[in-house]
Image (cartoon, rainbow, N blue to C red):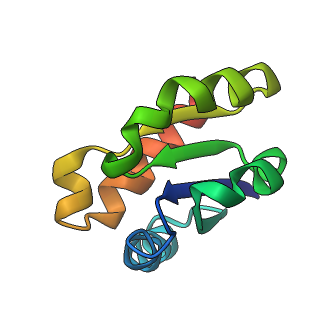
Amino acid sequence: MKNILLVCSAGMSTSLLVTKMNTAAIKLDANVKIKAIPEAELKTNMDSANVILLGPQVRYLLKKIKLDAEPKGIRVDVINSMDYGTMNGEKVLKYALSLMEK
């Protein structure tokens, strides 16, 4: 099972996206666990992640998180603003899965 972490300021705005992504995971038969967390909890959750996706509102953290995560083999990127705004769980999930393949 692959683990995807969604990170935002408080972990609240990404919770709905997690629900949509879980629905898409069932449809796509993807074996993933998706969790939304606030940035403050990232350090304690990072080691279990395969991919970390940042909400657009915390994109300023990208460089810092990449420095911590990528040496551990964890891919990090920012969720596309349009996909985030429309809560397109399937598209965000497919992007996360594609990051794991690289």
- Report the label total: 0
Residue drawn where x is 34% and y is 65% of the image: 89
Task: Please state if 101 lies on the left or on the right of 67 as rendered.
Answer: left
Residue 4: x percent and y percent? 62, 54
Q: Is residue 99 above or below residue 21?
A: above
Q: Is residue 12 above or below residue 94?
A: below
Q: Is residue 45 above or below residue 80?
A: below
Quadrant including the N terminus: bottom right
Residue 45: x percent and y percent? 77, 56
Task: Please state if 38 lies on the left or on the right of 98 as rendered.
Answer: right
Residue drawn where x is 55% and y is 67% of the image: 29
Residue drawn where x is 76% and y is 26% of the image: 73
Residue 42: x percent and y percent? 69, 52
Residue 10: x percent and y percent? 50, 68
Task: Please state if 82 lies on the left or on the right of 38 as rendered.
Answer: left
Quadrant including the C terminus: top right
